Image (tube, helix red, strand yellow):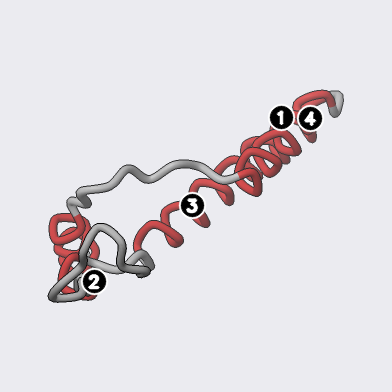
Amino acid sequence: MFSALRRIRLRRPHWGVYPTRRLAAAVLAAALLWFVPGIAGRITAIAALVAIGAVAGFDYLRLPTRRHVELERVVDELLGLGDAQ
């Protein structure tokens, strides 16, 4: 448990995490399960939402941390106005 909390604290990304179309489609499919009549519809819809939340959390924890991302700028030393890049 401490490992997961440590990973979340290390993560603190400088970028935003946005949902994908795949996640939106999964939530839409889970929303349609609410139309199944009776207790079976409720149970399957809640189970689908819990599964989607678990998979989204797993995907978030698999994102690279700040230590794993390395940026490097490469620029020519001299670049004049008429020079081709």
Residue at the spot 14% in from the left edge and 55% down from the top edge: 9
Q: Nearer the viewer, residue 35 or 28?
A: 28
Q: CA distance from mark 1 to mark 3?
A: 16 Å
Could you give the CA–CA distance between mark 3 and mark 4, rounded to whole angstroms? 19 Å
**Mark number, residue 32:** 4
N-term-proximal mark, 1 vs 2: 1
Secondary structure at badge 3 equals helix
Among numbered discs 3 and 4, the one appearing first in the sequence: 4
Q: Which residue type does callout 2 highlight?
A: Val
Question: Which residue occupies the extreme front position in the image?
Answer: 82
Q: Residues within 10 Å of mark 2 (few under 14, many from 20)?
A: few
Q: Which residue is mark 3?
A: 56
The answer to which of 55 and 1 lies nearer the viewer is 55
Q: Secondary structure at mark 2?
A: loop
**Which amino acid, by three-letter code, is at mark 4?**
Leu
In-front residue for pair 29/78: 78
Residue 67: mark? none
Residue pointed to by mark 2: 69
Q: Quadrant of residue 2?
A: bottom left
Residue 58 vs 39, above or below: the answer is below
Tag 4 and tag 1, C-beta contact below 8 Å: yes
How far apart are the alpha carbons under marks 2 and 3?
21 Å
Q: Secondary structure at mark 4?
A: helix
Quick one: label 1 or label 3, which is nearer the N terminus?
A: 1
- In the image, residue 31 lies at what x, y percent? 71, 29
Instruction: Residue type at mark 3: give it.
Output: Ala
Q: Are marks 2 and 3 in contact (CB under 8 Å)?
A: no
Q: In the displayed image of the protein, which residue is found farthest to the right?
A: 37
In x, y percent, where is residue 60? Answer: 38, 57
Task: Look at mark 1 in the image and give the residue it sits on.
Answer: 31
Q: Residue at x 20, y 71 (%)?
A: 75
Query: What amino acid type should be assigned to the residue bearing mark 1?
Result: Ala
